[in-house]
Amino acid sequence: MAAKPGLGTLGEFPRLRLCRLPTPLEAMPNLGEALGGARVYVKRDDCTDLAFGGNKVRQLEFYLGEARLQGADTILITGAVQSNFVRLAAAAARKSGMDCHIQLEERVPRDDPLYRNSGNVLLDRILGATLYSYPEGEDEEGADRRVGEIAEELKGQGRRPYIIPLGPGHPPLGALGYVVAARELLEQVASRQLSIDELVVPSGSGHTHGGLLFGLRALGSRVRVTGVCVRRNAGPQKERIRDRCREIAELLEMPNPVADDDIRVIDDFLAPGYGRSNPPTLEAIRMAGSMEGLILDPVYTGKTMAGLIHRARSSGPGRSFVLMHTGGTPAIFAYGAELTAALA
């Protein structure tokens, strides 16, 4: 008898509930019609409630669960200047009665006042986080090392810090949030008797993309998952997702259900780089807003929608797509001048 699809030891991991689930799954018929008759849906993980929401809340439920188990009183995290993850880590820490120290990395070559002080940075300050700066944007190992040094300084002051790591080589606790999300999505699709051909997701750290892909395959779903590169090119990103799925399998003490040809990434909309927009991304933001009242950002979700539009146009009518909306809405204010000029 074949083994029943399952998720290993997932239920054994500590989890601190931070958001209201399930998030909505909504149809986008106007956009679908504009794309030649595609059936288009959006999974609204921008509606995870906490501090403007976003996908990182699901991940933080597992990180904060582990932090609480260890008796931590302070959360440390590193990310880009306009990082959604650090904003939500600060909110999750405060909601859980913990302090938060944030390191902001120079990943995007811009120093205008809006980028430096608006959007997520303003929210970091409202949330009472202690901010640090790291001069390099593509040095994950160095950024993690510096956070470790800050943690040692805090220990010297009698604090009990918990680090949410950036680089690879750490147990991917955050990815478990999207293994859970895969089950949630399949239940929503089944309850509404929908047929989904393809899920389009942003692919950066690999926790969202890898977690969803792993969860879907572990539960027996063969839905295509297309990751839209938002930070690095397709070659190294595919390797990152391969590693992430292997690490999830090790963490859950189960066989890896993800085959190499399951890992699909496209980097057509990455240039000129992380946190920098391009014409297809700006057009995707305009189409989503003007046709569906859906707000996307230029860093993650705008590029992901550009990928969905490309896939829908090249696949022909009748195919069904789900956009994983990972949030990031506060960042649009940091890019206000650029967006205003492009969309005028």
Image (tube, grey):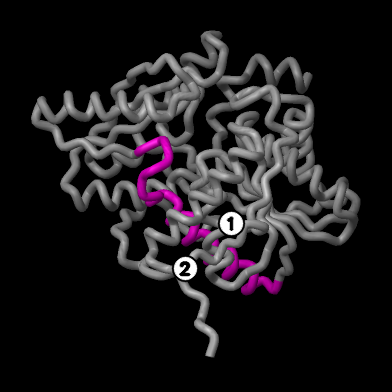
| Pick the front one: 343 or 198 | 198
Which amino acid type is marked by label 2?
Pro
Q: Position of residue 252 (x, y in %)?
A: 39, 63
Q: Of 182 and 243, which appears nearest the observer? A: 243
Give the SS element for disc 2: loop
Rendered image quadrant of residue 126 = top left
Q: Which residues are magenta?
A: 165-193
Q: Residue at x 26, y 29 (%)?
A: 148
Residue under the image location 68 percent in, 50 percent down = 264
Apparent side of residue 76 relative to residue 138 in the rendered image (left or right): left
Spot occupied by residue 250 in the image (x, y as percentages of width and height):
40, 60
Give the side of residue 122 with respect to residue 219, left or right: left
- Rendered location of residue 137, percent (x, y): 48, 21
Check if residue 61 falls in the magenta segment. no
Identify the residue under disc 1: 24
Tell me the kind of residue under disc 1: Pro
Are circles 2 and 1 on residues that touch, CB within 8 Å?
no
Q: How many numbered marks have been drawn onto this rendered protein structure?
A: 2
Where is residue 225? Give x, y as percent: 66, 55
Q: Quadrant of residue 165?
A: top left
Reply above or below: 193 against 313: below
Question: Which residue is located at x 40 percent, y 32 percent?
Answer: 86
Point out the tag, 2 or 1, that comes first from the N-terminus.
1
Q: Secondary structure at mark 1?
A: loop
Q: Is residue 159 above or below residue 34?
A: above
Q: State how far apart marks 2 and 1 are (Cα).
A: 31 Å
Name the residue tied to disc 2: 255
